[in-house]
Image: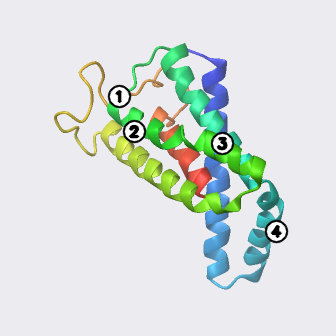
Amino acid sequence: MNDSVITILAIFALLSQAFVGLVLLLFLIGRAGVPHARNLLRDLGLIVGPNSLWLAFIVASISMAGSLYFSEGKHFVPCNLCWYQRIAMYPLVPLLLLAAIRKDRTVRVYVLIQAAIGAAISSYHLLVERNIVHESVGTCGRFTTCATDWLASYDVGYLTIPTMALSGFALLVT
């Protein structure tokens, strides 16, 4: 089955993962004493830094719009862990918009904490979805299970809704 919106969201998640991986790799290589990696990381910071609040707002907005598309457009019933991830992501949209307009960089601490909490929830959700951790009674709702892979029939490979959410949170943390 093919769906253009899901394909675009999958591409966004893959690009997010690639960027986070690149930054992490440059950081680790730089810590190992390779000066070129440190210089590349610094240059990347100089490019992204001035627009980081607007970029973070865009990431949070796309993440929120994607989750709304899944529930309202595709009629996927969100499980409890999906709701907790939404609780972590949705407030970031107006917070980051206001911070970007005001050029308030002090918001970074609040965004980092909120995104790290969301990433932890997404990571746990992935463990449940992959049956590494079993759902405890009452963790998920009566109408859906947290182990449901809603995207299994959409040809997006290993990407699932919690994987996409984790990609957005990881990009915000980065």
Among numbered discs 4 and 1, the one appearing first in the sequence: 4
Residue 2 lies, with reference to residue 32, above or below; the image says above
**Element carrying mark 4:** helix
Q: Name the mark nearer the viewer: 4 or 1.
A: 1
- Say which residue label 2 marks: 84
- Looking at the picture, which amino acid does disc 2 mark? Tyr
- Say which residue label 1 marks: 79
**Residue 1's x, y, as percent?**
55, 14
6 left or right, relative to 120: right
- CA distance for labels 3 and 4: 21 Å
Q: Name the mark nearer the viewer: 4 or 2.
A: 2
Among numbered discs 3 and 2, the one appearing first in the sequence: 3
- Say which residue label 4 marks: 43
Could you tell me which residue is drawn at 19 percent across and 33 percent down?
Answer: 138
- CA distance for labels 4 and 2: 36 Å
Among numbered discs 1 and 2, the one appearing first in the sequence: 1
163 left or right, relative to 35: left
Question: Are there few (<14), some (14-19), or many (20+) residues within 10 Å of tag 3?
Answer: many
**Element carrying mark 1:** loop
Query: Dots 3 and 2: beta carbons under 8 Å?
Result: no
Query: Dots 3 and 4: beta carbons under 8 Å?
Result: no
Could you tell me which residue is drawn at 68 percent across and 69 percent down?
Answer: 26
Could you tell me which residue is drawn at 67 percent across and 60 percent down?
Answer: 22
**Residue 42's x, y, as percent?**
77, 72
Task: Tell me, for residue 59, which label it has, or none.
Answer: 3
12 left or right, relative to 72: right
Could you tell me which residue is drawn at 23 percent across and 21 percent down?
Answer: 142
**Element carrying mark 2:** helix
- CA distance for labels 3 and 2: 18 Å
Question: Are there few (<14), some (14-19), or many (20+) residues within 10 Å of tag 1?
Answer: some
- CA distance for labels 1 and 2: 9 Å
- CA distance for labels 4 and 1: 41 Å
